[in-house]
Image (cartoon, rainbow, N blue to C red):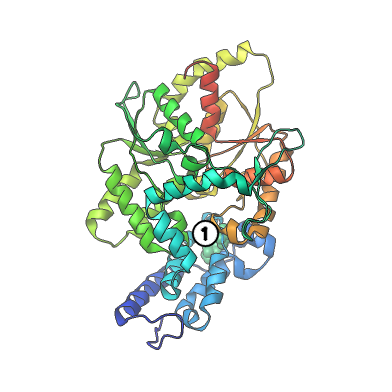
Amino acid sequence: MVEIKKTVPKMGTKSEAGMKKLANRLKELEDQLVVCIRCGMCQSVCPLFEQTRREADVARGKLALLDGLGKNLFTDPDGVDERLNKCLLCGSCAANCPSGVNVVEIFIKARAILAEFKGLSPMKKLIFRKMLANPSTFDNLTEWAGKFQGIFTKDEKNAQGTSCARLVAPLISPLINDRHILPMAAKPLHKTTPMINTAPGRSGLKAAIFTGCIIDKIFPAIGHDLIDIFKYHGVGTYIPQGEGCCGIPALASGDMATFEKLVEYHIKLFDQEQFDYLITACATCTSTIKKLWPSIYEGKSSGIREKIGRLSEKTLDINQFLVNKVSFSNDTQGIKSENFNQNNVRKTRVTYHDPCHLKKSLGVISEPRDVIRASGKELVEMEGSDKCCGMGGSFNLYHYGISSKIGNLKQKNIADTGCDTVATGCPACMVQISDMLAKEHLDIKVRHPIQLYADFLREQKLI
Ligand code: SF4
Ligand code: SF4
């Protein structure tokens, strides 16, 4: 049982009510921690442990640390912070856990407790509370940053004279290191398509689209493809004006206030229209809305909880939606075979990387592969297709050395297939894989499965 002393050392001057709240949250966590039987099966699948071989880095080691969180918070809050945040939140451990320990949720809740105890750094407060929590401010600031990005970056060509990742950043910040970063789009999706609301067509379905920050600001082409594909399949489309972030960067840093603000903002936004499904092309957004939104609101006031529950139930990954809800195979079969017979050329070889947030969190495995095949491509499996790419959101920012080592293994597995293109259903993985391939000057394209499908429909002059 956790004991909370009332003499709080330098880290915080919490009120008695604040301390009680903290104690309750520690107790909640304790109840989840007892499920871990310390078997160590999480070790063999943890991409971080594979690199560091440190028990402290694997789920079992972190859960043991959290077992004494009540005490450790007071004796070594910075140490707890460091160990707890050194994690990709990839969920490989949870997917391989015989006891069903919900590791990612436990780590996220522990980070929130820690942030509440220590307080957020001024930089995080600025980024999350002043920028991310206000979608229009965030849009304006990123647009402004996009205009000046050329000053801090330079073009880099690969060995073939074309480029996988297009920019290399010099040392503008110690956090940038030698990353090859993808430029922000000249026009984010919300600028070119501020609002769409169309009626269902031949599919009889209407879907709302949750765009997500990375697609909006770096890969708006994926959003345009998604809209074109919906039009082709007769799916009514709803994109409300003013969409923002799903909240995962704030939540992963323990900033519950920003996370809740964003969740409640989007609940109101999507409440304005009737639709059958909420679709995202970002694995991380899908997993956050489907799993973390409801789990964080468990036990909160019933009105908002029920609305979140209804929206998360309707949320689907785009590949899942196309394959399982739209008459996708009927719509594509005829045109696919005709295409292959006419063109006696080698099909583009595509390999697929399973994003952790699609396979391990949501069990979406076959559908993206179906979409790739329906796009007339030859799918070649890589070794370890479901091994984490090493991105892990802010993990990549703070632990770039380890993140790159993990990403380099992915890059090698991709290259070994002899593919022309690697497809993946998460734009964050696309950013990391582009960086890793660019470091090796490999001319392998990085695409979302639905981009391949949209290209195919365009070749057929269907969109
Ligand atoms: S988290 Fe699961 S796999 Fe890891 S030690 Fe605990 S019970 Fe075993
Ligand atoms: S979430 Fe991923 S990186 Fe973190 S402990 Fe589990 S397997 Fe390791």
- In the image as oriented, which residue stretches furthest toward the left? 303
Location of mark 1 (residue): 98
Q: Is residue 236 left or right of residue 57?
A: left
Which one is in front, 366 or 162? 162
- Image height of 401 relative to 7, above or below: above
Quadrant of the picture in which ligand 1 is shown: bottom right
Q: Secondary structure at mark 1?
A: loop
Residue in the image at 39% along x and 51% along y = 137
Q: Is residue 26 above or below residue 159?
A: below
User: Which residue sits at x=61%, y=12%?
Assistant: 341
Q: Position of residue 49 (x, y in %)?
A: 64, 62
Q: Residue furthest top?
A: 342
State left or right for residue 434 relative to residue 100: right
- Residue drawn at x 63%, y 44% is 433
| Residue 203, picture quadrant | top left
Quadrant (top left/top right/bottom left/bottom right) for the N terminus: bottom left
- Crowding around mark 1 (Cα neighbors within 10 Å: few <14, some 14 to 19, many 20+) is some
Q: Residue at x 49, y 20 (%)?
A: 332
Q: Position of residue 225 (x, y in %)?
A: 48, 29
Q: Position of residue 286 (x, y in %)?
A: 43, 45
Residue 71 in sight? yes
Q: Find residue 238 and report its horizontal and vertical position in percent.
A: 33, 34
Q: Nearer the viewer, residue 136 or 229?
A: 136
User: Tag 1: residue type?
Assistant: Pro
Q: Is mark 1 within 8 Å of ligand 1?
A: yes
**Residue furthest right as drawn:** 159
The residue at the far bottom in this view is 7
